[in-house]
Image: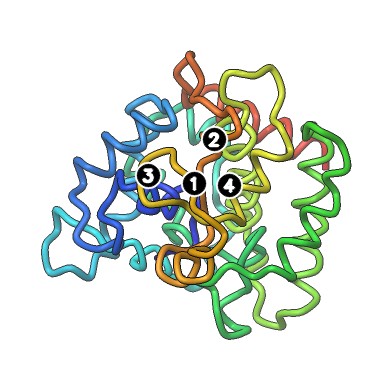
Amino acid sequence: RSPCPAMNALANHGYFPRNGRNISLQQFISSIKDVYNFEEKITSGIVAVYQPFTTTGNNNTLNLNDLDHHSEPKPNIIPSPRTLLQSGDIANVSVHCPDPGEFDGSLSRSDLALGDNHSFNETIWNTVAAHFQNKTISIPTAAKARKDRFAAARAANKEFDTSDATANGGRGTTALYLLVMRGQFRETKTKFVQIFFREFAGSSRGAGVSPMCGYMLIWCTGQDRIPFNEGWRRSNRTITMEELGGLVEKIRAAE
């Protein structure tokens, strides 16, 4: 599928084609909005970042594995996350976020220079999840988990991209899972995040699977599941650019 749990989960639950191929740009926009309740500025911005890397032969469609694209490191010219996200300038987002779904220091994937930037890496995720010792995940805890993962990846990868764009990509990922997996609760539940990153989905939207089917489904559908069965529901309040940018800044400050 892709290196992005949020996008994989949409395919695993049938909001995208389950094979992750030939997804229309409109389907990207509408599914992300409907399931995660992002405002259109965010969903359109996500698609604007992904679209230049399509390999389908049709500029109006994408494959999830197009998100594997990894650019050369860029100069540290990125504006602050709050400025960039609040601006709603989609062209600017595309320029300063050259990697559509993959970047060094991922919370759950290895770096491209180390061989596989696509597949879920249990060992890497366990180092991140080890920080989550409480029932909910606070901003300082999430920030430390991201910072420590970034440092470990940098130590392991001699070609590690140290640009601000990469650091902010990690902060953005952290902000996104905190906001999305908070859902209708006041705080982000640890069990929701664990399921989102590491468990597999069932055969229908919101459904689980029996253990005897697990090994086959984990091979064909990937790791990422939305925790409907455990009580997660999308936020009643639309997640805005301003909220996302503000949380990225709080994560930066907490590091």
Return the residue nearer the eye: 166 or 130.
Answer: 130
Q: CA distance from mark 4 to mark 2?
A: 12 Å
The amino acid marked with disc number 2 is Asn
Q: Residue furthest left?
A: 58
* N-terminal-most mark, 4 or 2: 4
Dividing the image into 4 quarters, which one contains the C terminus? Answer: top right
Q: Residue furthest right?
A: 133
SS of the residue at dot 4?
helix
Disc 4 + disc 1, Cβ < 8 Å = no
List the residue tagged with mark 1.
208
Disc 1 + disc 3, Cβ < 8 Å = no
Q: CA distance from mark 1 to mark 2?
A: 7 Å
The amino acid marked with disc number 4 is Phe
Report the side of 92 relative to 144 (left or right): left
Disc 4 + disc 3, Cβ < 8 Å = no
Quadrant of the rendered structure where residue 19 is? bottom left
SS of the residue at dot 1?
loop
Q: CA distance from mark 1 to mark 3?
A: 28 Å
Q: CA distance from mark 3 to mark 2?
A: 27 Å
Q: Residue at x 53, y 64 (%)?
A: 212
SS of the residue at dot 3?
helix
List the residue tagged with mark 2.
229
Report the side of 120 relative to 128 (left or right): left
List the residue tagged with mark 4.
196
Disc 1 + disc 2, Cβ < 8 Å = yes
Q: CA distance from mark 4 to mark 1?
A: 13 Å
Task: Classify 246 as above or below 73.
Answer: above
List the residue tagged with mark 3.
46
Return the residue nearer the eye: 66 or 209.
Answer: 209
